Image (tube, helix red, strand yellow):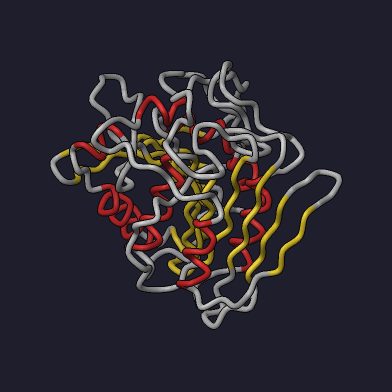
Amino acid sequence: MKRIIAAVTLLAISSCSGGGSAQPTRPAGGVMSDETLQHDGRERRYLVHNYSGGKPAPVVFVLHGGGGHPENAENMSQFDIIAAREKLIVVYPGGTGGMPGGRLLTWNAGHCCAYARENNVDDVGFIRTIIDGLVSSGRADPKRIYVTGMSNGAMMAHRLARELPGRIAAIAPIVGAVFGDEPPAPSPVAAIIFVGQDDQSVPAKGGPLGGAQRRGAIGGLARPPEDHPVAPDVAQADYWARANGCTAPVEAEDKAGKIVEIIWNKCSSGRPVHFYRVPENGHAWPGGRAGREQADQPTPKVNASEMMWQFFAANPKP
């Protein structure tokens, strides 16, 4: 089922990560479709924002965080701005949840989170079905399928890259984590990773989700028996560096801004890994918008969406 909406420019209003219904800013010139499909006994919803002009185009999947929804991911990432300029397709899928209204949704990323994890929802199959539909319809360039996501969505991006390496060219997890017990990735996938230096919900040093205070969206959605500590933040990059056959990285620290950058460019697979620990940024999308008024405010000094698109553009599938 598909509902097509002409693209218009709308005022952006802050949306709550759990249940906000505010409309994000959308550039003119694209075709917006609100689509659903039946998968694994559930009706699943996703937004497709197509700025390609009718040609097969790169596709960027943007996965909301735990407790979010598709419009929330659109608003936080501001990826439509890049899509309009670069003539891309952006897909904002929705997770699953036990409440009415299509809000408070989560992804089954393994140890996290909530409804999706507890019900063993087949989110990998859901995303695979969307990808295959976009490719078979001629809308997507199969060598340029990319995935980003925030928090629980970032964890899901790691899982998708591990389980769908034949379809995904590169990933860009934002303030996410790995848990340290993931199986080795069967194939290399390029990765650019952003974490917040001040993140208390997915702590940089590792440990329980939500930190010592058990606060934040992820903290409230991680509950027994799934409450599993995350690995230190750079473990995400180490994981993909091993999978991609990378040698010793180059490390740098911006003394003024104190951004930590670790780059693996010498990789036998040709699939690089870039890692950024962003200062003055908590559990938020660097350069984007906060999910709700009381949430961590993202730093404006680093634009993760722009940086990841440059990385994606340089790393199609061979």
User: Is residue 260 left or right of 316 when viewed as pictured?
Assistant: right
How far across and how far down the image is residue 114, in percent?
29, 32
Looking at this view, is 250 or 115 the one in front? 250
Whether residue 45 is situated above or below residue 85 in the rendered picture:
above
Looking at this view, is 6 or 118 the one in front? 118
Which residue is at the far bottom?
A: 268
Name the image quarter holding residue 210.
top left
Name the image quarter holding residue 134.
bottom left
How far across and how far down the image is residue 318, in percent?
50, 78
Whether residue 73 is situated above or below residue 249 in the rendered picture:
above
Looking at this view, is 145 or 274 the one in front? 274
Whether residue 233 is situated above or below residue 192 in the rendered picture:
above
Which residue corresponds to the image point at 54% horizontal and 32% vertical from the top-left? 200
Looking at this view, is 206 or 154 the one in front? 206
Quarter placement of the N terminus: top left
Which residue is at the far left?
A: 41
How far across and how far down the image is residue 82, in percent?
64, 46
Which residue corresponds to the image point at 64% horizontal and 26% vertical from the top-left? 297
Which residue corresponds to the image point at 67% horizontal and 49% vertical from the top-left? 306
How far across and how far down the image is residue 261, in percent?
70, 57
Which residue corresponds to the image point at 50% horizontal and 32% vertical from the top-left? 201
